Amino acid sequence: MNTKNHEKTLFVCRAAVIAALYVALTYASRAFGLDSGMIQLRVSEALCVLPIFTPAAIPGLYLGCLSANLLTGAHWLDILVGPVATLIGALGTYALKKLPYLAPAPAVLSNALIIPFVLAYGYGMGEAIPFMMFTVGVGELLSVYLFGMVLYFALRKRGTKWFS
């Protein structure tokens, strides 16, 4: 196998593993009732730090979020828009990868700004959108910065051979 095909294969495999991890961690959050609603603590969102290490995380996170929303019976609006919010966050994280403390911010912001509209118009939640922006944002802060930065430091400490 030539080097170019090998790199493409590794990219696809890494994206698939990240997508599968996202789904599994979403199910783990769901087991505790934390994966959806106005206050969300999706442990899977910790994976939003992975674009710092590999661009394969970008499609992996998108496909993981899409798959998780499909498999958990999310509203059609959430199936369409939720993964886009995750994709925007992943692209922003990748763009800021040289600033690891700032890099996860796009994931927090994209979800905090987009998901409340899904909650209001898809799920009919009557709370004020700015309030839901706050609650979703807090959940994202915890998922991405608390859990995600733990993951970031663990990967950085152990080396990133899996990603290179």
Image (tube, rainbow, N blue to C red):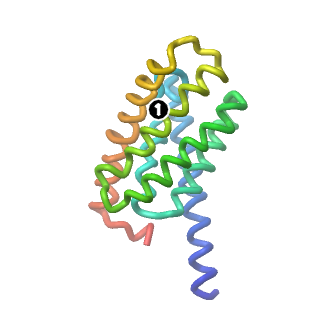
The quadrant in which the C terminus is found is: bottom left
Q: Residue most toward the right? A: 76
Which residue was labeled with disc 1? 112
For residue 71, what is the image quadrant?
A: top right
Q: Is residue 2 left or right of residue 164?
A: right
Residue at the image position 31 percent from the left and 55 percent from the top: 100
Give the vertical position of 14 relative to 37 (above or below): below
Residue at the image position 46 percent from the left and 21 percent from the top: 130
**Considering depth in this image, is 89 or 49 the residue closer to the camera?**
89
Residue at the image position 64 percent from the left and 86 percent from the top: 1
Q: Position of residue 65 (x, y in %)?
A: 59, 43
Residue at the image position 55 percent from the left and 50 percent from the top: 61
For residue 78, what is the image quadrant?
A: top right
**Considering depth in this image, is 98 or 31 the residue closer to the camera?**
98
Q: Residue most toward the top? A: 126
Q: Amino acid at mark 1?
A: Ala
Q: Position of residue 85 (x, y in %)?
A: 55, 41
How many numbered marks does the figure carry? Answer: 1
Give the vertical position of 36 relative to 155 (above or below): above
